[in-house]
Image: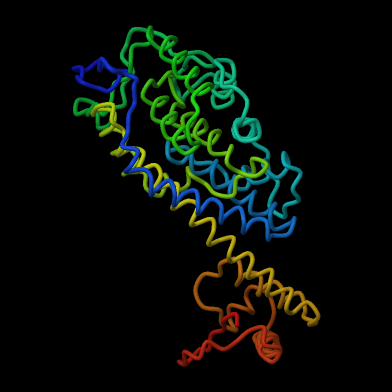
Amino acid sequence: MRRTQRHSAYIWQRNDWPNFRWDAEALLEPMSRLSRLHGLLNGRMSMLGFSEKNRSLLDAMTEELIGSSEIEGVMLNPNSVRSSIARRLGIEDDGLLVEDHYVEGLVDVMLDAVHKCKESLTDERLFGWHAALFPLGRSGMHRITVADWRKGEEPMQVVSGAFGHERVHYEAPASSDVPEEMARLISWCNTAELSSFIMAAVAHLWFVTIHPFDDGNGRISRTIADMFLARLDVDSARYYSMSAEINRNKKAYYEILEYTQKGNLDITGWLLWFFDCLEKAIMRASAVIERTLEKAAYWDKFREIDINERQRKVINRLWDGFEGKLTSSKWAKMCSCSQNTAIRDINDLISKEMLRNSGEGGRTASYLLP
């Protein structure tokens, strides 16, 4: 890390660090909303069949792992992530099997955090997570300290900008202070008795403020948050992705972290931002699950109707998020059949009330689910 002029008044430099505080009254309504939405999500999940539950779980965990890595600029192969999670959970998946030892390590970390969410946090557990993120002992081209707290006298800084025009967004506590700082955080994680929503948000901020590792701090801070959030889920099954939602709001995420780390120990603003992001993640998952329930009801309604494999394939594509408008020419292309065959398939489904003409007119007819 490059040494630059030191910023003053980071929260860890304050005399009252780390005595975080917040306006409980301001959090009352957001937390009530979160609890209600989370309960509704679990209720919807209980209405899904076994295979639909597994697919929803697989989708959410895949999105979580990809999203958390993407925040840090690390792009993962979605097929590799999905196939690794499916194999670990014993879920049958029709996706491509792509093995990647690095992804395997990331999946290990996520499953350890979520499935063992009520186990104590320890140095060794965190070191194990860190080793899985950096199996080769390098971050890019640079060798780093792995499975141990960062070393050295150079300040740990979050920097952006070209060389000579850098901007220091944040400077963490000295490496020599990290063991004591982490002992305090780990003790709090294992003994505090607060709402899991608050525990997740505070632990996330506290960890990333200490920045105890040479690299991977953001990903591990979000893993710790996931660990606390998993305590609210039935059987620790996660059907929404907080990291994917953060990734959609990445600029705001970094701005609120920087603002909070340069403020005082009143972190109400951070908590409100975190809760709002979590609420959006749960609402997004609820909408997807609602669509899954509608799809299940559709197939149940028409379970006695005889259709061919081309028709079943296209209908499932419509339910799972077909881009654009369905036309007979798109049907023919998807099913590798003639235009006449596509039109016969479509008209047959319309007669069975499984599909309808959009009625939009124009030169090319398009079709929708009823």
Q: Which of 6 and 293 is in front in this view?
A: 293
To which quarter of the image does residue 130 belong?
A: top right
Where is residue 321? Give x, y as percent.
56, 67
Left or right of residue 284: residue 132: right
Left or right of residue 86: residue 322: left
Where is residue 66? Give x, y as percent.
53, 43
How many labels sit on residues?
0
Q: Nearer the viewer, residue 87 or 14?
A: 14
Quadrant where the C terminus sits is: bottom right
Q: Which residue is drawn at 50% across and 36% down?
A: 196
Quadrant where the N terminus sits is: top left
Q: Residue at x 74, y 74 (%)?
A: 300
Q: Is residue 15 above or below residue 358?
A: above
Q: Is residue 185 above or below residue 229?
A: above
Q: Is residue 347 above or below residue 236?
A: below
Q: Is residue 212 above or below residue 283?
A: above
Where is residue 96? Give x, y as percent.
69, 50
Left or right of residue 179: residue 154: left
Q: Which of 148 and 299 is in front in this view?
A: 299
Q: Which residue is drawn at 42% across and 24% down?
A: 207
Q: Nearer the viewer, residue 104 or 177?
A: 177
Residue at the front extreme, as displayed:
25
Where is residue 310? Give x, y as percent.
72, 76
